[in-house]
Image (spheres, rainbow, N blue to C red):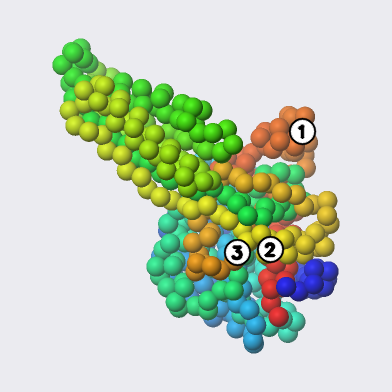
Amino acid sequence: MNEPTAVADRTRQITAGLKPAALEDFYRDLHRHPELAFQEHRTAAKLAVCLRSAGYDVTEGVGGTGVVGVLVNGDGPVVHLRGDMDALPVHEATGLEYASAVDGVMHACGHDLHVTWLAGAAEALAAARDTWSGTLVVIGQPAEESGGGAAAMVAGGLHTRFPRPDVLLGQHVTPGLAGFYPHTPGLTMSASDDIDVVVHGVGGHGSRPESTVDPVVTAAYIVTRLQTVVSREVAAAHSVVLTVGQFHAGTKHNIIPADARLSLNLRTQDSHVRDRVLGAVRRIVEGECRTADCPEPPEVTVRPGYPNTVNDAVLDGQITAVHRELFGAETMFDFGPAMGSEDFSLLVPEGVPYDYWYVTSTPADVWEAAPGRDLAEKFGNVPGNHSPLFAPDLSVLVPGVQTLVSAALSRLA
């Protein structure tokens, strides 16, 4: 670990030549052209061109559309920097002049910022390679939103074709008055599982419900009963979210369908609690179907998505110290564990430490106009990730590059 004050000073020197206008152009172009998971061909190509021009050895198509750039610069640690690239199926409603030009697709989670920060940091560190030694591996990851991108890159040889990391570093844009850099040692994000449920009934004419077993009614009871799992089966000390995100059944007003389908999402921070909740979901689904005399048992399929994200506490403390020197102690605070989820941790071999922090991005006028008597209330009343109104302040472009540069410099010899 390099001394924080020295790292902050070097970061300021290295990033003094950053051109905000160029970063804005890069970002606006990405925002106008969002691409869904595993379709990030244009985004990946743009990042690859940037890395090659900076002197990196670039490999494209890792895990589908992933990009890996390697810059070997003498002896020293191997530092992996990661940014995710995919957008969301969201209709943008920001009204920005650089709003999405792709109907129904938007960078509503800020991954366009992540790629811009990654490209800017990669260029700045490459240009200053005479000031450090070691190896930088820059990772443009596809499909974070679908949960399969990190695993696809690992299956595509991330751990075998490229230098093994000594550390993995990353960050995420978040709502909150622009100019803060939250860090959380230890558990910082939750595990996420998707659950698919199929309720089998007996279809028929809407005028003769007595001749059917209505799966819509049974599924509705399931939805209602599921609301009691967290409130009545999980201790208050544990944080759990169970969401019914989709309910599909039927094709016409007067037809009772033969089946109904539910899509659930579960967020947990403890493996034992996860097992308990999954057991409760199965019990409720199976019990309601038996009560309704469904002709066959329901189907309950659990699709594990993201593991818990657990920052190495020592590493996080060291990088927090660097960011404190760089931006000021008043810009640091601890979010605490969030219910959001990430596949970030899958990018490193087991036992390799990693750190993942946040950059707040809400424009000052939006923050001030938001109702709320305190930070928590205001935080809940400004557009956040996945909102069609999510529009980060462009003032965070340069600081977001500096956070990555300084974190990398803290490890490089």
Amino acid type of the residue that numbered disc 2 sits on in the rendered structure: Val
Q: Is residue 35 visible?
A: no
Q: Write down the residue under mark 3.
A: 354
> At x 69% / y 73%, what residue is drawn?
411
Q: Write down the residue under mark 1.
A: 374
Q: Is residue 107 left or right of residue 285?
A: right
Instruction: Return the x and y of residue 350 as percentages of the image width and height.
Output: 50, 67
Q: Nearer the viewer, residue 146 or 90?
A: 146
Q: Nearer the viewer, mark 1 or mark 2?
A: 2
Q: How many marks?
A: 3
Q: Earlier in the sequence, mark 2 or mark 3?
A: 2
Q: Nearer the viewer, residue 217 or 90?
A: 217
Instruction: Return the x and y of residue 217 as percentages of the image width and height.
Output: 31, 21
Q: Write down the residue under mark 2.
A: 314
Q: Is residue 323 left or right of residue 65?
A: right
Q: Nearer the viewer, mark 2 or mark 3?
A: 2
Q: Earlier in the sequence, mark 1 or mark 2?
A: 2
Give the CA separation, mark 3 to mark 1. Answer: 32 Å
Instruction: Return the x and y of residue 35 as percentages of the image width and height.
Output: 48, 55
Q: Is residue 374 visible?
A: yes
> At x 25% / y 21%, what residue is drawn?
292
Q: Secondary structure at mark 1?
A: loop
Give the CA separation, mark 1 to mark 2. Answer: 31 Å
Q: Residues within 10 Å of mark 3 (few under 14, many from 20)?
A: many
